[in-house]
């Protein structure tokens, strides 16, 4: 029974850490106007609190008892409970079965967290599931014999730290560092997230986690600590390199769960059962140091590396293996083939690091410029608004020749077969551009532009849009002044219904009710033109007539929203559209 309770406690702890600490808590905390700055402060506070909790755990166990502290840990902070459980594992289960129990508990936790209903749930539902799990664990905490918590009395000599302890901490620190960096990169890169944590891959990930954790537990019960940690380090080393390469992202999705499960089980088992500690008095300080240094500090360093570099440098992985090899050969005096194996691994990593081109740490705008060139956009679109011509009304403010020559490379274009793209960010929203790349003829009837769905297989589409929408406040100000100064020449209106069906129905629907085939793709649905709301077209006192306001919106759109303009339409055509919109409002069939 105590083995079942211990296994369930491990499941609850890792479930808490995975679902709540890594997803629900951070997502819920990010909901606010000052999310970026506040979240950094929150993360720093979490790290300091975690390290402080690790330092205090041995003394708290001595004061309150392990079982009481476990219960408090589940109700307050799951990670504190993990330190307590790892330090007292020898007292709750047989050391010969500790690995199996930890493997089952860890595997079930990670498998549970990869169930689609929990992994893809809202942060509120994830929090509720974790609260229920932690509450049950607090009720069914394992029994830890009070009299055996600390073994020898306080007058006994201070427990010595095992000779290999700091090397094991180094390995765990490297593992958590690589894990956290890879996790951050995957979580913040849409294509990698889809390739590793996509909804169709969650059951695969659950199986990898479970069987990897179970295999680690069985190996640890045989005393094979290094045979678990070194393969885990190899898996995460390769995964951390492949995760930044779209061609290998799918393969990294197989390696990453296995590496995480292997070392997660060892993290629980090592302090109490494999470190050489015989009592909780000896094991708890080791667990506190291990989780404080490798757990919290390693996690912070990994996230910091990924946030700043957006990759795990090959030289870092090489340095980790070099340090591990040096200690293994010197302190452990590995015989026979082991040094040769380490030498082969180091040689492969060195070759990889030399063959991998250095990261330019390019911004999305820079990467988008490269996509613009590689896709040949320059052959059909110009990026040159001719000064003193109709271009300035159609496409936006012009740029001086010296400023154009500052571009590297200069991208004025070869010839203009489509609209000029220099200031397209002033005329089209990012969402509109994305839909235009995917369905060009729906938004631009008669366009010869082909669809570019492949750009959304990875981040190239988002980068290209970042490049195209890169504009300055001065350009925005000039564009808005041009729009405000425009008035139609008041020719006889053209046939508005035909123009509406051609240019507007894809979003607003054939009857103008905001139910066009593309309407569902916008965060804010297109307006129902029969009934409103008409926040941007209600006539103001002493303002322009409503027909002129509607004509201006038809020609230039609503800058800053998804509503595009139709700059190439003549004054007669935009007035015809305005007349048609007025007729929709007055229609007796309006809902």
Image (cartoon, rainbow, N blue to C red):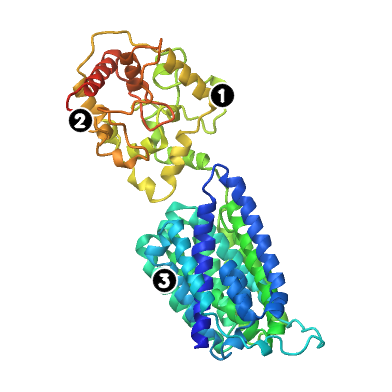
Query: What SS does tag 3 mark?
Result: helix
Query: What SS does tag 2 mark?
Result: loop
Residue 89 appears left or right of 418: right
Residue bearing mark 2:
511
Can the viewer see residue 316 in this picture?
A: yes
Q: Quadrant of the C terminus?
A: top left
Query: What SS does tag 1 mark?
Result: helix
Residue drawn at the location 20% of the way across and 30% of the way down: 511
Q: Nearer the viewer, residue 95 or 228?
A: 95
Q: Nearer the viewer, residue 273 or 388?
A: 273
- Residue 127 vertical position relative to residue 324 in the rendered view, above or below: above
Mark count? 3
- Residue 503 vertical position relative to residue 309 in the rendered view, above or below: above
Tag nearer the camera, 2 or 1:
2
Q: Position of residue 25 (x, y in %)?
A: 53, 58
Q: Nearer the viewer, residue 155 or 475?
A: 155
Q: Nearer the N terminus, badge 2 or badge 1?
A: 1
Residue drawn at the location 36% of the way across and 16% of the way down: 539
Whether tag 3 and tag 2 are in contact, CB under 8 A, the answer is no
Q: CA distance from mark 3 to mark 2?
A: 48 Å
Q: Position of residue 330 (x, y in %)?
A: 72, 80
Q: CA distance from mark 2 to mark 1?
A: 46 Å
Q: Nearer the N terminus, badge 3 or badge 2?
A: 3
Tell me where residue 513 sits by quadrant. top left
Query: In the image, which disc is placed on residue 187?
Result: none
Residue bearing mark 3:
206
Residue bearing mark 1:
403
Crowd around label 1: few <14 · some 14–19 · many ≥20 (10 Å): few
Tell me where residue 277 sits by quadrant. bottom right
């Amino acid at each position: 029974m105590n083995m079942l309770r211990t296994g369930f406690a491990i499941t609850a702890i890792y479930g808490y850490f995975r679902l709540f600490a890594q997803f629900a808590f951070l997502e819920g905390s990010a909901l606010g106007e000052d999310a970026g700055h506040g979240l950094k402060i929150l993360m720093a506070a979490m790290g300091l609190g975690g390290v402080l909790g690790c330092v205090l755990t041995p003394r708290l166990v001595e004061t309150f008892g392990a079982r009481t502290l476990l219960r408090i840990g589940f109700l307050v902070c799951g990670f504190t409970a993990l330190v307590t459980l790892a330090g007292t594992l020898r007292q709750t289960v047989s050391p010969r079965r500790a690995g199996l129990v930890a493997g089952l508990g860890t595997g079930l936790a990670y498998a549970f967290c990869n169930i689609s209903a929990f992994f893809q749930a809202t942060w509120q539902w994830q929090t509720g599931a974790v609260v229920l799990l932690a509450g049950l664990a607090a009720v069914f905490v394992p029994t830890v014999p009070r009299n055996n918590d600390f073994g020898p009395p306080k007058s006994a000599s201070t427990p010595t730290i095992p000779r290999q302890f700091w090397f094991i901490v180094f390995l765990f620190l490297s593992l958590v560092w690589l894990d956290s960096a890879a996790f951050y990169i995957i979580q913040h890169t849409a294509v990698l997230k889809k390739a590793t944590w996509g909804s169709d891959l969650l059951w695969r990930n659950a199986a990898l986690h479970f069987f990897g954790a179970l295999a680690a537990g069985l190996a640890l019960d045989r005393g094979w600590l290094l045979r678990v940690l070194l393969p885990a380090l190899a898996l995460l080393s390769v995964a951390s390199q492949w995760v930044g390469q779209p061609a290998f992202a799918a393969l990294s999705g197989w390696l990453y769960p296995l590496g995480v499960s292997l070392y997660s089980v060892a993290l629980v088992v090592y302090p109490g059962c494999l470190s050489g500690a015989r009592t909780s008095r000896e094991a708890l300080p080791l667990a506190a140091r291990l989780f404080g240094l490798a757990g919290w500090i390693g996690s912070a360093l990994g996230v910091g590396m990924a946030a700043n570099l957006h990759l795990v440098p090959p030289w870092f992985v090489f340095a980790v293996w070099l340090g591990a090899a040096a200690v293994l050969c010197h302190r452990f005096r590995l015989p026979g083939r082991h040094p040769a194996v380490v030498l082969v691994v180091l040689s492969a990593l060195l070759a990889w690091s030399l063959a991998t081109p250095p990261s330019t740490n390019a911004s999305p705008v820079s990467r988008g410029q490269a996509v613009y060139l590689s896709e040949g956009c320059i052959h059909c679109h110009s990026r040159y608004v001719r000064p003193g011509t109709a271009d300035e009304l159609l496409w936006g403010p012009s740029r001086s020749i010296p400023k154009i020559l500052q571009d590297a490379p200069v991208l004025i274009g070869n010839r203009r077969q489509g609209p000029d793209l220099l200031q397209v960010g002033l005329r089209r929203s990012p969402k509109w551009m994305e839909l235009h790349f995917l369905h060009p003829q729906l938004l631009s009837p008669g366009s010869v532009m082909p669809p570019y769905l492949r750009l959304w297989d990875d981040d190239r589409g988002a980068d290209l849009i970042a490049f195209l929408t890169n504009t300055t406040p001065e350009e925005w100000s000039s564009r808005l002044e041009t729009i405000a100064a425009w008035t139609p020449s008041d020719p006889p209106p053209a046939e508005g219904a035909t123009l509406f069906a051609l240019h507007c129905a894809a979003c607003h629907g054939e009857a103008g009710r905001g139910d066009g085939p593309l309407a569902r793709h916008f965060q804010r649905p297109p307006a129902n033109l029969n009934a409103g709301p008409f926040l941007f077209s209600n006539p103001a006192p002493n303002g322009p007539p409503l027909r002129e306001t509607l004509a201006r919106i038809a020609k230039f759109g609503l800058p800053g929203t998804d509503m595009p303009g139709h700059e190439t339409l003549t004054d007669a055509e935009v007035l015809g559209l305005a007349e048609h919109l007025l007729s929709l409002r007055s229609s007796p069939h309006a809902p």
